[in-house]
């Protein structure tokens, strides 16, 4: 039961699918197995296969076993789209979204909204299957493929590296906010490196020379790109990285408050030994505001603060308003959808610019 709870599906598949055998290739590896292939391998009629699929009680146990074995051997998945086409008279184009954590958190939901809006704009249907870990992805992919979508988008909350379920290889698939080992898979991700590089140039141009950096955990894929961008901009300005204080947050949301201890450690005789605080995201910046303002530190007159992500519904509520970097989740979602709708070719990583939003904290 715990495994079932881990997977929430945005449409009811239970009424259409009486079993969940994996599907991908026929025995000869040439394509998706058909009902006819199963019947041929089991030595029965297609009607008998259909009755087994619908748990008809009149099928003899030995025959049922042969059919089920054939289904497993061929990795057969029932074509639910064919049922819909027969019922509706035509088959509309359908875009399927496999969303890892994206639908259940506020941080990347704009990706999903953009995908849905873009699909609707071009007359495509779309549906979503939400998963909470890569362990759920293989099972979700099997159910997704049962609907024979015309294209698939795999999206994640937070830039990350994924292991694509084997059943999805060879499908018309695009990655959004994630990457995989296979260079043939097209993916759309934020350009974290350039964003941090350009924001550092902004800080240098404003005269800041003593930064304190509180990066996201080292294990986060975006962290490496952002730190590299910062350090390159610092070196390109002829500055020494030895004058930079850099720290990484420990993994886990409960470690945001670690920033309070870090800030306290960098106050000497009641004054900060840094003139700008560079935060891994806007939530860290929120903690920083509380600590700094409680100490009577003026932002930005005494210490400037910069965030990253322009957190949905929060970024503009800081007082003073927070300078931050916009994660382009809406553009990522739209471009991923257009990749499929327009039939774009080529598998490469496309980095989407992240605008610098200069407000009053720098």
Image: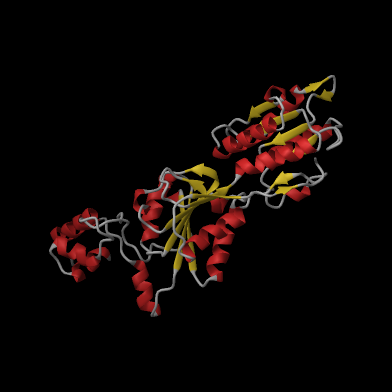
Image location (x, y in percent) of residue 305: 77, 37
Image location (x, y in percent) of residue 310: 69, 48
Place residue 220 in its image quadrant.
Answer: top right
Q: Is residue 289 visible?
A: no
Residue at screen point 43% across, 63% down: 12
103 relative position to 147: left or right: right
Q: Residue furthest top?
A: 269
Image location (x, y in percent) of residue 326: 67, 49
Q: Nearer the viewer, residue 206 or 138?
A: 206
Q: Is residue 269 above or below residue 260?
A: above
Residue at screen point 41% across, 64% down: 149
Q: Nearer the viewer, residue 360 or 4?
A: 360
Image quarter (top left, top right, bottom left or bottom right) of the C terminus: top right
Q: Residue furthest bottom?
A: 89
Place residue 33 in its image quadrant.
Answer: bottom left
Q: Is residue 157 above or below residue 27?
A: above
42 relative position to 76: left or right: left
Q: Is residue 346 visible?
A: yes
Q: Is residue 214 above or below residue 341?
A: above
Residue at screen point 49% across, 65% down: 342
Image location (x, y in percent) of residue 152: 44, 58
Count how many numbered circles sit on residues in the image: 0
């Amino acid at each position: 039961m715990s495994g079932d709870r881990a997977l929430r599906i945005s449409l009811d598949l239970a009424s259409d699918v009486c079993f969940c055998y994996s599907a991908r290739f026929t025995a000869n590896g040439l394509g998706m197995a058909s009902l006819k292939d199963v019947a041929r391998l089991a030595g029965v009629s297609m009607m008998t296969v259909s009755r087994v699929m619908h748990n008809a009680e009149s099928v003899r146990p030995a025959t049922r076993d042969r059919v089920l074995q054939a289904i497993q051997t061929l990795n057969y998945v029932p074509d639910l789209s064919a049922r819909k086409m027969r019922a509706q008279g035509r088959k509309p184009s359908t875009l399927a979204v496999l969303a890892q954590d994206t639908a259940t958190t506020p941080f990347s939901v704009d990706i999903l909204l953009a995908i849905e809006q873009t699909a609707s704009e071009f007359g495509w249907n779309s549906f979503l299957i939400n998963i909470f870990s890569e362990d759920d992805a293989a099972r979700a992919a099997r159910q997704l493929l049962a609907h024979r979508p015309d294209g698939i988008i795999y999206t994640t909350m937070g830039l990350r590296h994924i292991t694509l379920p084997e059943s999805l290889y060879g499908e018309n698939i695009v990655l959004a906010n994630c990457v995989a080992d296979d260079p043939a898979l097209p993916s759309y991700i934020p350009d974290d490196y350039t964003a941090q590089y350009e924001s550092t140039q902004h800080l240098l141009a404003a005269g800041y020379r003593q930064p304190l950096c509180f990066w996201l955990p080292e294990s986060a894929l975006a962290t490496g790109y952002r730190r590299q961008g910062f350090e390159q901009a610092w070196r390109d300005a002829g500055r020494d990285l030895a004058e930079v204080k850099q720290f990484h947050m420990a993994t886990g949301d409960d470690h945001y408050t670690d920033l309070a201890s870090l800030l306290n450690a960098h106050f000497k005789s009641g004054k900060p030994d840094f003139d700008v605080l560079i935060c891994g995201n806007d939530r860290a910046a929120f903690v920083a505001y509380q600590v700094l303002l409680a100490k009577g530190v003026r932002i930005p007159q005494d210490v400037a603060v910069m965030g990253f992500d322009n957190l949905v519904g929060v970024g503009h509520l800081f007082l003073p308003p927070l300078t931050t970097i916009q994660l382009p989740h809406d553009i990522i979602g739209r471009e991923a959808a257009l990749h499929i709708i327009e039939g774009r070719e080529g598998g490469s990583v496309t980095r989407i610019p992240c605008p610098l939003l200069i407000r009053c904290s720098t």
